[in-house]
Image: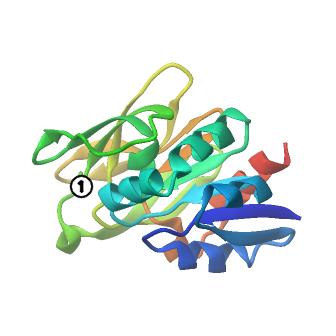
């Protein structure tokens, strides 16, 4: 049985836990402390408010634990706000470079709120290398602008205002996803994460 942890400090963690429970051979666990990391095989940092989640990670002492978790080779998937938190470079559409707490794990540059405000949320198709077309819901989503070293953008979205930008990136045991796979019921990215955890 593969145990997937979902960081449960803020955001839509319950939707991820529910969807993971539908994948055979997988169980999901809410992660609220550094101690919880020792009993999981992979971790998801869900969508929510990236500044709040980043501060709570630091406040709860999870920052060092999550970095050690990744260094140990276990996979981590950052979804929407989670993709921002694991990025090494973050800029904001309005204020430019941000000073928010980040884990600085993945060699990607992310643009916060790339597509506008909550009212500008949208649903579209994203083609993900190795997976195929996915229905994707973007809610105040980031865009992955650059990837370097071992990081690679493997999924793109075409937006009328922003152009063609990254929606999914991978680097070794890290996955950054700019949209919300938990809202469409498509489990293919989760199955990819489970496969990485079984390696």
Residue at horizontal 24%, vertical 44%? Answer: 163
Crowd band around label 1 with a 10 angstrom C-alpha radius: few (<14), some (14–19), many (20+): many
Residue 189 left/right relative to 80: right
Rendering coords of residue 149 (x, y %): 51, 19
Residue 156 appears in the picture as rendered? no
Residue at horizontal 54%, vertical 51%? Answer: 62
Residue at horizontal 89%, vertical 65%? Answer: 1
Residue nearest the viewer, comparing 141 with 122: 141
Residue at horizontal 51%, vertical 45%? Answer: 63
Residue nearest the viewer, comparing 104 with 132: 104
Look at the image and name its color scheme. Answer: rainbow
Rendering coords of residue 56 (x, y %): 42, 59
Residue located farthest toward the left when viewing the structure as drawn: 94
Rendering coords of residue 103 (x, y %): 46, 40
Is 166 located above or below residue 124 in the figure? above
Residue 170 appears in the picture as rendered? yes
Residue 172 left/right relative to 125: right
Rendering coords of residue 36 (x, y %): 69, 61
Asked where in the image residue 175 lies, by quadrant, the reply is top right
Asked where in the image residue 34 lies, by quadrant, the reply is bottom right
Residue located farthest toward the top when viewing the structure as drawn: 149
Is 119 located above or below residue 36 in the figure? below
- What secondary structure is found at the residue carrying circle 1? loop
Task: Please give the residue where the numbered disc 1 appears in the rendered image.
Answer: 113
Total numbered labels: 1
Q: Considering the image in quadrants, where does the C terminus appear?
A: top right
């Amino acid at each position: 049985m593969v145990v997937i942890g979902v960081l449960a400090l803020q955001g839509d963690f319950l939707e991820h836990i529910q969807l993971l429970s539908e994948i055979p051979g997988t169980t999901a666990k809410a992660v609220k402390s550094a101690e919880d990391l020792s009993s999981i095989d992979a971790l998801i940092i869900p969508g929510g408010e990236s500044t709040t989640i980043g501060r709570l990670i630091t406040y709860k002492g999870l920052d060092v634990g999550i970095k050690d978790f990744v260094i140990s080779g276990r996979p981590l998937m950052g979804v929407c706000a989670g993709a921002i938190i694991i990025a090494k470079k973050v800029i904001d559409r309005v204020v430019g470079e941000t000073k928010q707490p980040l884990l600085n794990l993945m060699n990607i540059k992310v643009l916060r709120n790339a597509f506008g405000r909550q009212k500008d949320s949208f649903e579209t198709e994203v083609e993900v290398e190795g997976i195929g077309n996915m229905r994707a819901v973007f809610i105040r989503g980031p865009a992955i602008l650059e990837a370097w070293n071992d990081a690679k953008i493997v999924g793109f979205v075409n937006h009328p205002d922003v152009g063609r930008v990254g929606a999914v990136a991978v680097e070794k045991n890290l996955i950054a996803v700019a949209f919300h796979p938990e809202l469409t019921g498509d489990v293919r990215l989760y199955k990819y994460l489970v496969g990485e955890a079984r390696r």
